[in-house]
Image (cartoon, rainbow, N blue to C red):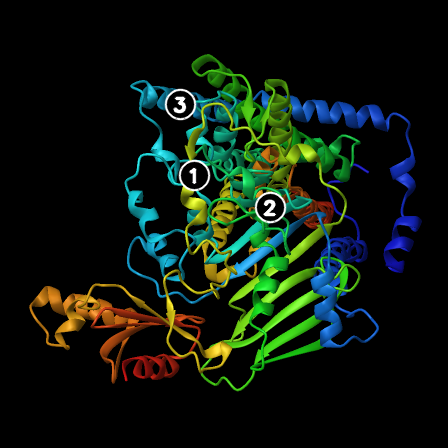
């Protein structure tokens, strides 16, 4: 610890120097955001995410158009599917529950994995570093852009689900899991809280992806490694014999967002989820910082 | 600075030290915090077992809310396919025998409390419990993206299953209301299952009923449960070698006298067969709105048949299935409380399929069925004839070829002995 303190204290005072820095990093963040969201790949990923709730909504509508019910109320299909016909708002929850295990994290893995490695692979990373922004600042800008993507991706699913649900199904009083009915407005608020929770659930994976991205010069390799890791963790999480390690897998509390639909809200797992994501962010964020700061950038 | 080349190697080492330190701190937090929270049994004045039991009996906590974790590992034999349906049956859910007639392909989902209780007989479940006086209780079984709620408010008992969007309603007859006894469940309408019967309090009271000469009750140290100081009451069978039960542990709140944790450990294996424990408890008054239930729009509502309330077998059950089955007869009254065996005439001689033929192997399909049967039962012989024993960690059952079913929390030998007594 003391060594670290002396190192930062005795280092060159470049971190506190110019007043123009704040403007600089805002500009850097803005340009990162533009780079991320102007890509065709990003737009294609968002389009795929938007298509999921629309398809689910149409499928449910067709299936129930002859008065039948979905799945008999029990197992089968993503959570909340059987409630969609009663209230269109539930399509938001269904869509998030359906995309959270794989679609959403996969897109986050692609964006996060490509963030640094993609620049390195394209030979643009060194030009970014030539600008007087510093590596830490660049990493922070990249991280913020990935976080913005997490939020955008979740919001895309939620908004398209809400629109589809409102168009195809009745809306009105929302029945919570506990059997309590609340107004549509409160239901909408809870849906927003759920969307934010889902976005935050992805932060751990996003940081992990960014860390992997700093290790390699190949964007494809970083994406594949991140998504592969996601699949591995999902598989580990499904093996009951490994339940000792399950609470430490970043996917473990993902579906706890449903607890926001209880009355009163059951906070235990939600807080555990946020804590776990913060833990992953701290560990892999600092690892990315250390690795990237000390790395030879040759491309 | 804007550097393409990294800094010196010494600074590189420092840099790598940061994530290692962060990981270390994280690991320490994850590892130490729960350890610190659970370690250090509280220092409490010594009490005798009688004092503690009295304290429990006097406990008058009517307002509380909390989270309860139920962990059940009864070691039920796993049947190929559809094991869910039958697994709870042997332990006599609160249903009368005829109640389940509509099961299976019934049109309305069965959301009555009985069918839900059988689900609690295996695995880990989280329950939320709230009570405000003897007339208002609510318990919710938290499922992944679903919830099963049971709300008792005055004469009304509602059950709601969010996955099926179906509700079940039962009303107590007018006279039955307001009769307040020990425990929360005295006024329990209909099937006798009230939210109260799922708390550690209820489970502990059931176990204490079994106290007699054949039981040793001691206080064994203290513990911290749900952040509260508690005494540990240990109940062990005395002189009952045939009992499958090793011990029952009840953690009693040192201040309120409320049981906070109930652990039932069988002799076989060290993992508890049943563990019911508060993980969080709050003695404040819960929101009265929590007890007002109106079935949500579009929900299927099933009304309970009004006279079912007086049906036998409606007595609240301890989650461990300690209580007897309806219509059962105790065959070995002379035995200690812990070795009692109940006999039920199933009225279907022939026992378990091909076994009735005395092991004579028939065709190919018969042999297969025989193998299947051998998979989860054991042959037994005695004065009662022959039969088959179905074993779990806690309760064993012997079905004779004459169609008699002997059930008890005793070992296979104890079961055979009791059956011999009954036959002879």
Q: Secondary structure at mark 1?
A: helix
Circle on res. A212: 2
The answer to whether tags 3 and 2 share a subunit is yes
Q: Residue at x 60, y 38 (%)?
A: B154
Between the residue at mark 1 and the residue at mark 2, the CA separation in whole angstroms equals: 65 Å
Quarter of the image where one finds residue A118:
top right
Cβ atoms under marks 1 and 3 closer than 8 Å:
no
Residue A289 in the image: above or below residue B269: above
Instruction: Give residue B306's position: percent from left, percent from top.
Output: 43, 39
Q: Compute the Cα span from label 3 to label 2.
A: 33 Å
**Location of mark 3 (residue):** A55
Q: Nearer the viewer, residue B350 or A223?
A: B350
Callout in the foreground (1, 2): 1
Q: Looking at this view, is A209 or A8 the one in front?
A: A209
- Nearest to N terminus: mark 3 or mark 2: 3
Residue B374 seen by the camera: yes
Q: Is residue B153 left or right of residue A235?
A: right
């Amino acid at each position: 610890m003391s060594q670290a303190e002396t190192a930062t204290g005795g280092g060159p005072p470049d971190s506190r120097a110019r007043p123009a820095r704040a403007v600089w990093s805002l500009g850097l963040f803005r340009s990162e955001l533009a780079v991320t969201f102007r890509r065709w790949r990003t737009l294609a990923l968002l389009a795929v995410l938007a298509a999921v709730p629309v398809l689910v909504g149409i499928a449910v509508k067709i299936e129930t158009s002859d008065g039948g019910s979905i799945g008999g109320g029990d197992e089968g299909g993503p959570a909340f599917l059987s409630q969609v016909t009663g209230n269109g708002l539930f399509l938001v929850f269904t869509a998030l529950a359906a995309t959270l295990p794989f679609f959403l994290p996969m897109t986050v893995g692609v964006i996060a994995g490509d963030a640094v490695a993609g620049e390195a692979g394209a030979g643009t990373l060194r030009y970014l570093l030539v600008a007087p922004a510093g590596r830490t600042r660049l990493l922070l800008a990249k991280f913020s852009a990935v976080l913005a993507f997490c939020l955008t991706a979740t919001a895309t699913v939620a908004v398209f689900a809400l629109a589809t649900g409102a168009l195809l199904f009745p809306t009105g009083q929302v029945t919570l899991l506990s059997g309590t009915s609340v107004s549509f407005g409160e239901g909408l608020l809870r849906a927003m809280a759920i969307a934010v929770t889902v976005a935050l659930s992805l932060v751990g994976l996003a940081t992990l992806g960014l860390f992997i991205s700093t290790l390699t010069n190949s964007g494809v390799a970083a994406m594949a490694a991140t998504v592969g890791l996601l699949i591995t963790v999902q598989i580990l999480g499904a093996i009951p014999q490994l339940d000792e390690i399950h609470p430490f897998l970043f996917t473990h509390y993902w579906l706890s967002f449903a607890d926001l639909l209880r009355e009163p809200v059951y906070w235990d797992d939600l807080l555990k989820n946020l804590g776990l994501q913060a833990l992953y962010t701290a560990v892999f964020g600092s690892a990315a910082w250390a690795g990237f700061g000390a790395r030879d950038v040759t491309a | 600075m804007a550097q393409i080349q990294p800094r010196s190697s010494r600074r590189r080492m420092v840099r790598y030290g940061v994530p290692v330190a962060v990981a270390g701190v994280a690991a320490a937090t994850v590892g130490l915090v729960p350890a610190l929270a659970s370690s250090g049994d509280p220092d409490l004045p010594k009490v005798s077992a009688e004092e503690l039991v009295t304290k429990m009996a006097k406990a008058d906590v009517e307002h509380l809310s909390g989270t309860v974790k139920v962990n059940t590992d009864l070691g039920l034999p796993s049947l190929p396919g559809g094991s869910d349906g039958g697994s709870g049956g042997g332990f006599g859910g609160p249903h009368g025998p005829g109640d389940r007639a509509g099961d299976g392909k019934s049109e309305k989902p069965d959301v009555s409390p009985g069918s839900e209780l059988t689900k609690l007989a295996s695995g880990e479940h989280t329950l939320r419990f709230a009570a405000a006086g003897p007339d208002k209780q609510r318990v919710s079984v938290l499922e992944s993206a679903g919830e099963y709620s049971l709300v008792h408010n005055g004469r009304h008992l509602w059950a709601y299953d969010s996955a099926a969007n179906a509700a079940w309603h039962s009303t107590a007859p007018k006279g039955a209301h307001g009769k307040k006894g020990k425990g929360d469940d005295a006024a329990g309408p209909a099937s006798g299952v009230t939210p109260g019967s799922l708390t550690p309090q209820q489970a502990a009271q059931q176990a204490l009923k079994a106290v007699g000469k054949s039981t040793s009750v001691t206080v064994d140290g203290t513990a911290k449960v749900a952040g509260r100081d508690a005494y540990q009451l240990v109940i062990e069978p005395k002189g009952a070698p045939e009992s499958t039960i090793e011990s029952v542990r009840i953690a009693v709140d040192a201040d309120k006298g409320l049981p906070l944790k109930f652990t039932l450990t069988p002799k076989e294996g060290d993992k508890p067969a049943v563990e019911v424990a508060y993980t969080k408890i709050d003695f404040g008054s819960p929101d009265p709105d929590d007890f007002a239930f109106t079935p949500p729009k579009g929900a299927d509502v099933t009304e309970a048949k009004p006279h079912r309330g007086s049906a036998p077998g409606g007595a609240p059950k301890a989650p461990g299935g300690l209580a007897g089955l309806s219509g059962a007869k105790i065959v070995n009254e002379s035995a200690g409380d812990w070795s009692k065996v109940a006999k039920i005439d199933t009225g279907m001689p022939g026992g378990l399929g091909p076994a009735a033929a005395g092991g004579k192997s028939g065709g190919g399909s018969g042999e297969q069925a025989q193998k299947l049967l051998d998979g989860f039962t054991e042959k037994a012989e005695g004065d009662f004839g022959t039969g088959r024993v179905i074993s779990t960690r806690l309760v064993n059952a012997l079905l004779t070829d004459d169609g008699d079913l002997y059930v008890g929390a005793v070992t296979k030998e104890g079961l055979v002995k009791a059956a011999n007594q009954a036959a002879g």
